[in-house]
Amino acid sequence: MISEALPRSGQLPGRLHHWVAGGWLRGTDVAFAALLAEDGGERNETTLSLAALASYQVGEGHTRLDLEMALSEPERLWPEPPEGAGEADGPACWLGQVALTDAVQALTGSAVVDMPDPASPADIGTAPMVLDGHHLYLRRYWANEQLIREALDARLHAPKHTLPGLRSRLDTLFPPQDTEPDWQRVACALASRSRFTLITGGPGTGKTRTVLRLLGLLQSQRMDTDADRPLRIRLAAPTGKAAARLGESISGEIEALPLPEPIRTAIPREVSTLHRLLGPRPGSRLFRHDRHNPLHADLVVVDEASMIDQELTARLLDALRPETTLVLLGDKDQLASVEAGAVLGELCEGADAGHYTADTVAWVADASGDDISPWQAEGTALQQHIVKLRESRRFSAESGIGAFAESVRQGDYRQAAALLDGDDGDIRRMPLRGPTDARIDAAAAEGYHHYLDTLHGSRPAADDWAATSAWAREVLQAFAAFQVLAVVRHGRLGVSGLNERIARRLRTDGRIARESGWFEGRPVMVMRNDYELGLMNGDVGICLETRLPGEDEPRLRVAFERPDQGIRLFLPSRLEAVETVFAMTVHKSQGSEFRDVLVVLPRPDIRLAGRELLYTAVTRARRHSVIAHPGPS
């Protein structure tokens, strides 16, 4: 048995320090094990080593350590070993020597590990880790999982109902079409009868159009029965950028809804971030709204749900009244949240095949007239509440971007590579001679000429706030036409290296005055929420030289666009956590849409980028995607 006792001093196993030095673990992972040793009195090396690995898994976006997988296929925990690290000295080698029975025995005998009783999982102690079957959790993530499971179960089994006149209301909102079924119509029908619905679909499949018609459907039914008490609707998204996009989409389409003006007026146009919706408590992980102070809402709609991690999902469900309807929108094939817990992806398992029961198929046929029998199967209760939108209006599956995205989604990299080398105009490959190839600097700089032309070509007169605001909005919108996306943060082909290279090229071209510090034209991204300024992680601003009424000289200020399309200006000195964003990570691009993107991969084999990452990157573009990577010229 590999479970030597530690000295009473609480010293950690030497292997943990070695793993950190080799880049296999983070310092925070070993710090967690040290806490168990020092405060929890844990002396077993196997338990402490597995605790550090469970913490590492959280850092990798997973909520638990699957012991069976980790001990039988340990290499799966590190798809890409740290550069220069010797695998023989890594944790995979140690894991390969540990028997599952020995690991379970060490954990079950530990005072820092609790095990839930399947008959009464709520009756559990307060240990910092939980062993549930062969899954080892940090306690917070196990508790969140239980909360999510219980809250969704209650919603899935709540009594269902059919709105009066549902078929005729759907006919008003969805004109007849040739395709059968109309999945947007099916989504609205199913969402109208229950307390929880998940609507998923790729780019351009009409998620926003669907939810806008759902809002009209539900609000018209309420106001037909009680005109003085419309539904209290709250709209949210994980980031300020995603919230702004949803607000713009709704505002731009709401007047075209074939509904009376009072109903359109009762549909909100304001979209907040999830954090603002829940009301964060300063200096705490907690929120103002929870089960003791729930949100005052009849309907809550959350867009870009793939970006919501497990923790925030649990807090959202905890803040909803039992009678509140929750609708989640998102693309299940996009990258998961940066934090632990790919909630949307797990909930949408099997969504491609539908798995609708005979009862659901019959109800849809009767209530909306749509035939979804080809997707009939013996599905779970959850699968009856999930609708996948299947027709893209942004680009067809035959277009370059659409076909490439579908090939990547299916894991067909041979077809994906063929598409990059084909003659389709909207997606292509840019082979680089190496990581220092200047062609990528030139292509990026050329892509950014448009917003800099806008900045210099339409500068407003001094002291005119309306003109200054319009100019700032025009510059921000021009910047959003093109974006460089990177898959790593460091190195010549990472975010940091690309930002330096692009700024240097733009300065050489005479388009910006300097390449570091604050300068006019510098694009920046907010890297963490700033509730005092009202700026959220992911918000993008542009540094502009502005002269406001009453000022003698112009000053540099950073312009941000609000969800209502208003402009806010901040002195650079007030922005504490921002980074230059000529290049951003693919993760940070979620919730955004650009006309053109340049995706930069650090290695020749596109498969190494990862399926969800490549899919997310190329589908940020409406018109053109270029994938640059080292390879033959």
Image: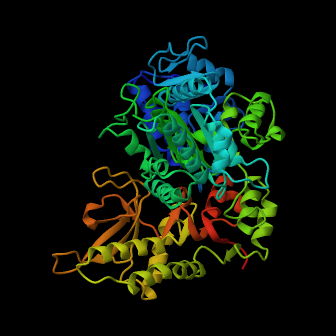
Tell me, yes or no, if residue 305 can be seen here: yes
Taking the image as shown, residue 78 lies to the left or right of residue 38, namely right
Q: Nearer the viewer, residue 352 or 514?
A: 352
Position of 44 relative to 280 (above/below)? above
| x 60%, y 31%: residue | 194
- Expressed as whole percent of the image width and height from the top left, the position of residue 115 reads 55, 17
- Expressed as whole percent of the image width and height from the top left, the position of residue 466 reads 30, 74
Question: Picture quarter containing residue 457?
Answer: bottom left
- Expressed as whole percent of the image width and height from the top left, the position of residue 605 reads 72, 63
- Expressed as whole percent of the image width and height from the top left, the position of residue 51 reads 52, 31
As drawn, the residue found furthest toward the right would be 374
| x 63%, y 43%: residue | 169
Position of 620 relative to 498 (above/below)? above
Q: Nearer the viewer, residue 386 or 138?
A: 386
Question: Picture quarter containing residue 455?
Answer: bottom left
Pick the quarter of the image with the C terminus: bottom right
Q: Nearer the viewer, residue 491 or 461?
A: 461
Tell me, yes or no, if residue 18 can be seen here: no
Pick the quarter of the image with the N terminus: top right
Coloring applied to the structure: rainbow
| x 81%, y 32%: residue | 377
Position of 228 relative to 452 (above/below)? above
| x 73%, y 55%: residue | 391
Q: How many marks are shown on the rendered structure?
A: 0
Question: Picture quarter containing residue 484?
Answer: bottom right
